[in-house]
Image (spheres, coloured by chain):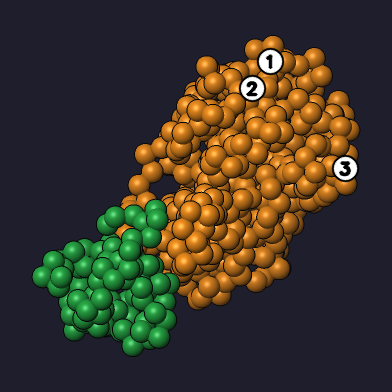
Chain colours: A orange, B green
Amino acid sequence: MGTVDGSPVVVTGLGFVTPIGHDTETVWANLIEGRSGVGPITLFDASELPTRIAAEVRDFHPERFMDRKSARHLGRYCQFGLAAARMALDDAGVDPHQLDPDAVGVVLSSGAGGIEEIERNQTTLLARGPRRISPFAVPMMIADMAAGVIAMHVGAGGPNFAVVSACASSAHGIGEAAEVIRRGDAEVMVAGGAEACITPLMLGAFSQIQAVSTRNDAPERACRPFDAGRDGFVMGEGAVVLVLEDGLRARRRGARILAEVAGYAASADMYHYTAPDPEGRGATRAMRRAVARAGLAPEQVDYINAHGTSTRLGDIAETTAIKAVFGDHARRLAVSSTKSMVGHLLGAAGAFEAAVCVLAVDRGVLPPTINLEQPDPDCDLDYVPNQARVTPIAAALSNSFGFGGHNACLVVRRPAGNGTAPPLGDTRTTA
Amino acid sequence: MTDTLDFRELQTLAAEILGIEPERVQLPLSFARDLAADSLDIVELMMAVEDRYQVALPEEDLQTMTSVGDLWQFLLAHHGERPPASGAESA
């Protein structure tokens, strides 16, 4: 995925608002120590629901990232997105206000948008009539508003939009943002996802299709991807943002380059609203093309951050797809699901997991799949059970699959040209 | 009834919605020009005022009510004319 000048698209900054921390070091420490962010729901009274647990964002103070009036008028998901974007830009050392307005764009994705605000205004409509609907209802609910708000607050005037593909939204968004840089339409892209839909309606709706865990008595143990005892995913919330940058620009300004976005591919299952293709054929095609696009042979992928939601159908279909793509190498590479700790961030999940791959490549440590005690017999790969693993990682693949059969796969790899990169196949990415 | 209205209460209400300090809300000031209120802020403020002061703000009056003083004069003349709406929040 080289740019028009032949340089790679690179990652130079990360920002997190998550159930396991709001800065890179806290998030990383919790990941490698296998700490769960799942607990009893405190955002609303969930006592009538079969599921009363979730991975909530706690200790988030919007006034650290925006003025009081903005905080009042932004939906929770937008607050998360703006905060993560500011932290990512700080981390990258990029201030869009100092740059040409066209130089920096934003692709900030969300699966559900401001669902909390939709629910609140619907309640008001029924109780008090249409003249009491908030004038901020529309801007608070639409799923593209986080991208717009970030542009307004940080001064990013380049391409600006959201990608909606359920739980693959921000993986698609990062891939498409990398494409914007690759074709020369921006030099820097603020790319990620934001979600805040731990609400009575959303949790109730996921409960109705028996998609969410009801392990209410042991929240930290509820999300158990690839384990025979799993009983569904755990809803999470938060925002994760990556700063993507033209590699040549990043090197010229002396930026710290964490990783390259080497490959991206997307596909459709063509199968069902909510269930994955049992053979994982759509996922297989997306993985295969993403790896090829990165200029890698399958054997050069060391780590996969799985979609791994902790649902039986999903875990098995993904395992099947990984075997189809990687053949014998599927037994040698490492796969883990960080959803076991952070829950399912839905529209922000792809961004979180892409960021995990960036950190795994940069730091040479694989976060584990926690709660993997009795592996499902149909899930027989190396899922890095329960303990982080220190090992050099040259290239990592992040899988994201969404309701609707949307598949998005991203490949990140160690940056070339810094003296530490291994001899990978794609010479186009040598700066 | 006018003696029961407290201007500081309106200052507090407007300040909360406009994200400013209450003492900045002064009679001669324009909501839009001086207090940076956009059209959405003004709709939100008027909804809150209708609830708090039990008044109805007709669309045609909103067009002419551009300053804090205009709103205050309207409230002095009309507050309490409308019974509280069901479920209205007390300020």
Disc 1, SS = loop
Q: Which of the two discs, 3 and 2, sits closer to the camera? A: 3
Could you say which quadrant of the image residue B8 lies in? bottom left
- Measured in 3D between alpha carbons, the distance from the residue under mark 3 to the one under mark 1, in whole angstroms, is 26 Å
Task: Tell me the subunit letter for badge 2.
Answer: A
Residue at 78%, 21% (x, y): give it. A379
**Is mark 3 in CB contact (under 8 Å) with mark 2?**
no
Residue at 36%, 84% (x, y): give it. B61
Task: Specify the label residue A271 is tagged with.
Answer: 3
Disc 3, SS = loop
Q: Amino acid at mark 3?
A: Tyr
Q: Earlier in the sequence, mark 3 or mark 2?
A: 2
The location of residue A263, given as percent across then percent down, is 74, 50
The answer as to whether the residues below labels 1 and 2 share one chain is yes
The location of residue A45, given as percent across then percent down, is 46, 33
Disc 2, SS = loop
Q: Nearer the viewer, residue A119 or B55?
A: B55
Q: Amino acid at mark 2?
A: Arg
Q: Amino acid at mark 1?
A: Gly
Q: Nearer the viewer, residue B54 or A374?
A: B54
